[in-house]
Amino acid sequence: MDGATARKTISEVNLMDYEEFIKVFGNVIEHCLLCAAAVWRYRPFKSVKHLYEEICTFVDQLPGSGREGILRSHPDLAGRVAMQGQLTAESTREQRTAGMADLTPQERDHLLQMNKRYREKFGFPFVICARLNRKDVILESLEVRLDNPAEVELEKGIAEVKKICQLRLSDLLESEAVNCRL
Ligand code: 2AL
């Protein structure tokens, strides 16, 4: 969306009916509309930070299987879904910002192989906040994180999901800082 003209204030958010709320916030966690649906009950939100923290709390309270499910809802960086042009608008923009559209064929092959190894080891995809990283850093992080135990990667992946969520909320809402728990 074009945030510059359409950003909402928290007061406007509090006036939204459920359907509108879901339409606006349903993808702040990729393909996990449930996260927005779950926090609806905490209106009125005192601030953008409050909304963000309720989403984080919901995510943190999920069992490990639920948090793994959230990671599995994310598309691989420069993966099949991206190649087929099937990413959500948000992911398309994020992956482009990180330079995923400009990988050399060698870089792309390397990333695909590392993503495959990561998925085989952990059973969920490598997730990183693409807008806060560039391709070299992403490739480096992937190599380093491949050596971690699964429980560490579950935590790291979810921390990245929260950063993605924070930036997506910032795109949708008036500029009040959401800077918490990063
Ligand atoms: C993504 C994505 O689609 N956007 C982002 O920031 N990270 N995917 C991923 N596997 O890390």
Image (spheres, grey):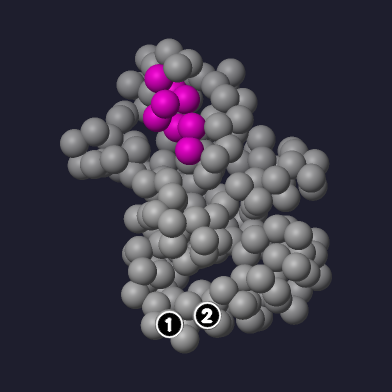
Q: Dots 1 and 2: beta carbons under 8 Å?
A: yes
* Outermost residue, left side: 5
Instruction: Examine the image and state in which quarter residue 130 appears.
Output: bottom left
Residue at (52, 80) in percent of width and height: 109
For label 1, the crowd category at 10 Å Cα-Cα, with few meaning under 14, some 14 to 19 and many 20 or more, is few
Residue receiving disc 2: 109
For label 2, the crowd category at 10 Å Cα-Cα, with few meaning under 14, some 14 to 19 and many 20 or more, is some
- Label 1's element? helix
Residue at (34, 36) in percent of width and height: 173
Residue type, mark 1 in image: Pro
Residue type, mark 2 in image: Asp
Residue at (54, 55) in percent of width and height: 75
Q: Is residue 135 visible?
A: yes
Q: Quadrant of the C terminus?
A: bottom right
Image position of 112 with respect to 79: above or below? below
Instruction: Give the image location of residue 92, x and y in percent.
Output: 38, 55
Query: Which portion, as a residue range, is magenta?
Result: 20-27
Residue receiving disc 1: 105
Residue at (61, 41) in percent of width and height: 56
Instruction: Give the image location of residue 14, x and y in percent.
Output: 41, 19
63 or 135: nearer the viewer: 135
Q: Is residue 97 left or right of residue 111?
A: left
